[in-house]
Amino acid sequence: MNEHIRIAHREAAPLVGAAAQTAAREALTGLASGALVAFLGPGALTDCDGAATIPLTPEALAFELNRRHPAPARIRKDPWAVAQFIEQRRHRKTLAMFMTEIFKPEVAPSPLQLWLAAAKPPLIVDTWYDGTTRAALSVAYSDPAQWGEIQGVTRAVDADAQWWKAYDAFRQRVTDSAADAWRTALYKPHGAVLPAGEALIADSDYVEALTEIDIQTPIPDLVRQRREGRGFVFIGCRFHDQMLRTYARQILKRSGGGHFAFVDPALLTTNERRFLAAEAITPIALSLQELTALATSC
């Protein structure tokens, strides 16, 4: 189905001024209480100490991969295509090595990530490949048994593998039933470079996932349970690529209402505006720095 057909709401201009401040406070209150779920994109890392040492956009990641193994000019801005090219030419192990190398620099959690982790919410969604939200949770929790991470994993290498793996605070593999006991679950739908380097990055990683995601098979049971009745707050996210929109839409499926997204109106594409309207997500024109100031002043 053409995704444009799904639009059920008129495209709304992002809230600005006093309206943006009011909506931002509502979103922050929901995050603090656990009534809303944070959905973090790579743009949420711009305030992190050391953020300049890792790519903070898909295009920047494509550049880093291409720098290590040049790809054809027509795909150089597409990280998934570049990753597929590397996998085909140099093997999966080389691609995993490049990803680990790219995200090896240590990046400290941002003030907003620390604030969010301190709220100890039931669920946090983080769509980038780094470990800063995990680091924030390790600061927030004195008891490591209270939290852990669920990563989406590629099935391109092993088609019979599970769609996700759960890791405790020490990055040890645990069962799904053990994860159910966590107070906070960090969900990385595209995976992460640590501990096993099984992140989804190449086109081939997404072929089967995108085939199955409409029936929710790749979404962990714990995530499905904890999103129920809750809205989402998108921070540092872009939806200018159809794959990013598809994943976000499926993670939102069967959740509660009251979604918010912090956006830069100057960067919004037509497809992004349509996506926000179709999913009834209220866009708020507030920078990450302004949002952080509001959160940390509460």
Image (spheres, rainbow, N blue to C red):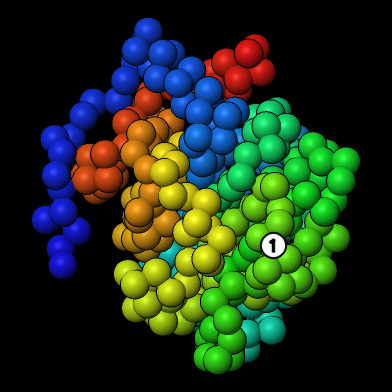
Of residues 50 and 181, the one nearer the viewer is 181
Of residues 224 and 25, the one nearer the viewer is 224
| Residue at numbered disc 1 | 179
Residue at left 19%, top 58%? 3
Where residue 210 sits in the image (x, y, percent)?
37, 73
Where residue 123 sits in the image (x, y, percent)?
59, 47
Q: Quadrant of residue 163?
A: bottom right
Vertical comparison of 147 with 178: above or below: above
Q: Label 1 crowding class (10 Å Cα cut-off): few <14, some 14-19, many 20+?
A: many
Task: Work out which residue is located at the far right of the displayed protein and give it.
Answer: 142
Q: Is residue 157 left or right of residue 96?
A: left
Q: Is residue 114 left or right of residue 239?
A: right
Vertical comparison of 281 with 93: above or below: above
Vertical comparison of 192 with 34: above or below: below
Query: Would you say residue 81 is visible in this rendering?
Result: no
Query: Would you say residue 52 is visible in this rendering?
Result: yes
Where residue 169 sits in the image (x, y, percent)?
81, 56
Residue at left 57%, top 15%? 294
Q: Is residue 7 left or right of residue 170?
A: left
Q: Is residue 81 left or right of residue 105?
A: left
